[in-house]
Image: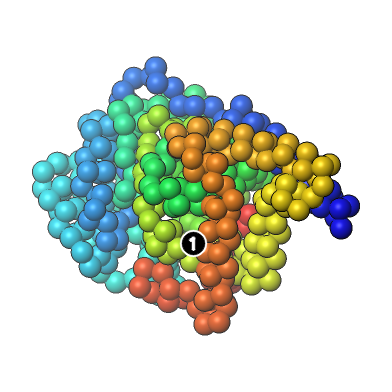
Amino acid sequence: MPVFWIVCAAAGLVYWTVQLLLVKRVLSNVAGLSRACRTQTGASVSVIVPARNEEADLEAASLSKLADCGSACELLLLDDRSSDKTGGIADRLAAGDSRVKTIHIRELPPGWLGKVNALNEGARLARGEWLLFSDADVYFRPGAVAAAVEYAQSRGLDHLAVIPRLENAGLLTDSAISVFVRLMALAPGIYNAGKPGAKSAIGIGAFNLVRREFFARTPGFEWLRLEVIDDMGLALLVRTHGGKSAVADGTQFVSLHFYRTLSQLRHGVEKGVFSGAQYSPAALFAGTAIFWLAEMSPLAGLVWGGAAAKLAGAIALCAAVYCCVLMNSWNGRGVFSAILFPVGDTLGAALALWAGLRPMLSGRIKWRDTEYSLAELEKNRRFSFRG
């Protein structure tokens, strides 16, 4: 048994050392948007915002977008069958500012996800040279749009995904979100998106900027009508059709509360995690178990091993904490939620397993009050984390 714990601790040391090196690579490779550029862009931009039951943030977030955009922008608010005050808030914003247009979507066409359909309607009606797809709860700071457009134009990009700052929630929720952010940062698209010939791409729902002229030459959202991970799907659409894509650090310009509570996080996981596992319960359960064991491996050596295992476990744990703190600091998040990564791992693993169990038993996923069969979603899936 002592040899077993030494092997566990050594494996944990290798795992966390590799992850730390990858995180440092990401931090060094992802450029930040410039704060030195002008506060308004000369190009026309259509900001397209799908909104379903977003009364809590829609008005304040929309006003922040309008304050940043300038006269050359338009803000398209897509009220996607909301049952709260979202539609009224959107109408009031449109009445008070000629740059705002509200589109009320009353019915969902067959064979479409609600958000993708709303994005499609916005893209169809938009007039700007650039299409900026953003969520209803995302806040812009002055210079955000100008910095992003300047970044894209100077590099000849067709698509730019901007990494937002994720505001702090409760400590437990933050610990789980921190794990999610770290895993997303290690996705191949983060550090490969701007490299010639790279097959991977990254999309971010908070801020996906696309050149309209290029987008018009693609099948558009029709190609993604049942793609659950729609932001990554948009990046894949660009890459698949020959576009140039990149990702930039916009944490100084763009922010949102990713999830405010564990309940909201659970609801979000139910949609995305099973899709990320390609609707395979075996892949989800096996992947979750292997990930959790790898993350916990330093603790196994520290708790049950002898002197050699404890030493390897201690070094691995230091690498793990350093890795997690680096990621949280980059995203403007607290240190404590980084240190609690074992708690976040466990919460995340439990939520992932729950997310897979429910659709596996029912054969369906419910999202935005509409149910979809797994067979239908799998048939129309475009994006895969496997590439």
Q: Nearer the viewer, residue 60 or 78?
A: 60
Compared with 176, 249 (above or below) is above
Q: Quadrant of residue 4?
A: bottom right
Return the residue found at the far right: 3
Residue 171 location (% of width, % of height): 43, 48
Q: Is residue 366 visible?
A: yes
> Which residue lies at the image location 27% right of the left edge and 38% below the top edge?
65
Task: Give the amino acid at mark 1.
Answer: Val
> Which residue lies at the image location 87% right of the left edge and 58% below the top edge?
1
Q: Nearer the viewer, residue 214 or 196?
A: 196
Question: Residue tagged by mark 1?
Answer: 269
> Which residue lies at the image location 59% right of the left edge and 30% below the top edge?
27
Secondary structure beneath dot 1 equals: helix
> Which residue lies at the image location 52% right of the left edge and 76% below the top edge?
358
Return the residue found at the far bottom: 362
Q: Quadrant of residue 292?
A: bottom right
Q: Is residue 119 visible?
A: no
Crowd class of label 1 (few under 14; some 14 to 19; many from 20; radius 10 Å): some
Compared with 229, 226 (above or below) is below
Residue 230 location (% of width, % of height): 48, 56
Residue 109 location (% of width, % of height): 36, 72
Compared with 313, 104 (above or below) is below
